[in-house]
């Protein structure tokens, strides 16, 4: 089982664009069930999107693609003089630790007999 991601989100730096390569047909089937049917932690917020940010094309996650808006000049001005505070929305895409958790639970789902007998 090979897992990798190619990019990170430009705004929240969560990993995006996953590639999971199962090695055996059994793994392939189990992975499909795990990801699309059992689905303990949904990964769909980590898909890659392209978005123009500051006249440049950037790779962002689904969450940032939906929610990102450029900060207006007046808000920036107020922040600099301390009149307004920057507010950050919690991102719904997965951080690397959460993906690690997702991967750790995978063998339990793949081979339930082995883990229960031992
Ligand atoms: Zn993001």
Image: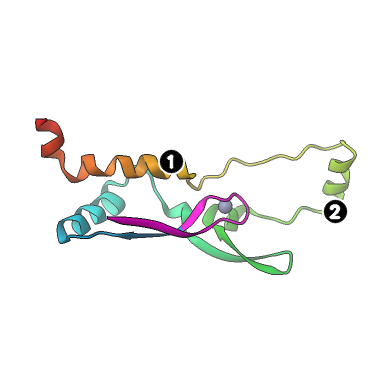
| In the image, residue 40 lies in the stretch drawn in magenta | no
> In screen coordinates, is 34 left or right of 87?
left
Q: Is residue 99 left or right of residue 88?
A: left
Where residue 71 sits in the image (x, y, percent)?
76, 53
Q: Residue lying farthest right?
A: 81
Whether label 2 lies within 8 Å of ligand 1 gets the answer no
Picture coordinates of residue 5, whole percent (x, y): 44, 58
Query: In the image, 28: left or right of 82?
Result: left
The residue depicted at 30 percent of the width and 52 percent of the height is 35
Range of residues picked out in magenta: 1-16
- Disc 1 beta carbon < 8 A from ligand 1? no
**Residue ID at (83%, 48%):** 76
Residue 69 in which image quadrant: bottom right
Residue drawn 71% across and 39% down? 87
Q: Which residue is mark 2?
A: 73
Question: How is the rendered protein coloured?
Answer: rainbow
70 sits left or right of 12 in the view: right
Say the numbered circle drawn on residue 98.
Answer: 1
Callout 2 secondary element: helix
> Up-down: is 11 above or below 114?
below
Q: Residue at x 21, y 59 (%)?
A: 28
């Amino acid at each position: 089982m090979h897992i990798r991601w190619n990019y990170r989100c430009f705004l929240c730096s969560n990993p995006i664009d996953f590639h999971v390569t199962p090695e055996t047909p059994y793994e392939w089937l189990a992975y499909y069930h795990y990801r699309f049917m059992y689905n303990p932690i949904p990964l769909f917020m980590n898909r890659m999107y392209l978005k123009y940010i500051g006249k440049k094309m950037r790779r962002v996650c689904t969450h940032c693609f939906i929610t990102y808006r450029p900060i207006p000049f007046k808000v920036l001005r107020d922040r600099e003089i301390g009149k307004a505070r920057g507010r950050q929305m919690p991102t719904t895409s997965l951080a690397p630790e959460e993906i690690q958790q997702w991967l750790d639970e995978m063998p339990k789902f793949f081979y339930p007999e082995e883990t229960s007998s031992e």
